[in-house]
Amino acid sequence: TIVGASSWAAKNFLLHLVKHYSGIETIYLAARDTKSLEAEIENLRVNSPNLVFVGLSEFELGRIIANSDVVLNFVSARPPCSMQDTLEATKFSLLLSRLVATSNIGLLLNMSSQSVYERSTGVPQTESSCTIAKSEYAFSKLMVEEMFQDAALRSTNTAIVNLRLSRLW
């Protein structure tokens, strides 16, 4: 299941997935606007009979997550964005973390951001590097990571990986 499937990163991931892993039974693509997403996927010439488009309602998400082995979360309010967009993305991630905590998925892969690191010129960042919320965006990313880690504590079958990606655009 790919949540936030209309993002640039999610669509590129999907292209790679469909091209190299044809044995996947079903790929759920969850987005706010499924009609636009379907048109975009068609324009990208993604030929896969196993794509299922779903909205982001709690009912629909709960149903697909319950039937998923892996969930990839691309939902984010990309900077620069309004405080409202950041809070809405964070609120949605809270819903997703609750669904993950009560499901039986094996892995949640959360796309986070390197904006959570304290920036030091010339110093490489690693998972053990100090994190700091210097912006609302970085704070929201750290909060979402903590929500998913908490969900993993409540769901003993689920592993959570927070990928702290560099800027993608």
Image (cartoon, rainbow, N blue to C red):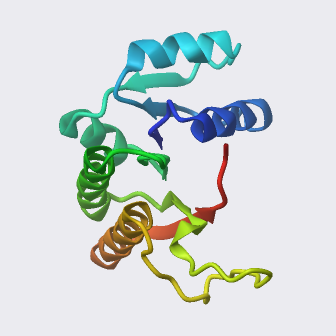
What residue appears at the point 47 percent right and 47 percent down from the top-left corner? 80
Image quadrant for the C terminus?
top right
Can you say whether 71 is above or below 147 in the image?
A: above
Can you say whether 149 is above or below 57 in the image?
A: below
Can you say whether 3 is above or below 94 in the image?
A: above
- Horizontal side, residue 56 vs residue 44: left or right: left
Frontmost residue, 5 versus 165 = 165
Count of all numbered marks drawn on residues in the image:
0
Q: Position of residue 8 (x, y in %)?
A: 60, 35
What residue appears at the point 61 percent right and 11 percent down from the top-left corner? 42
What residue appears at the point 68 percent right and 18 percent down from the top-left corner? 46
Can you say whether 111 is above or below 129 in the image?
A: above
What residue appears at the point 47 percent right and 61 percent down from the top-left corner? 106
Frontmost residue, 14 versus 138 = 138
Residue 152, image quadrant: bottom left
Residue 33, image quadrant: top left
- Horizontal side, residue 56 vs residue 10: left or right: left
Q: Position of residue 145 (x, y in %)?
A: 41, 69
- Horizontal side, residue 118 vs residue 99: left or right: right
Q: Where is residue 19 in the image (x, y as percent from the top left)?
A: 78, 30
Q: Position of residue 166 (x, y in %)?
A: 66, 60
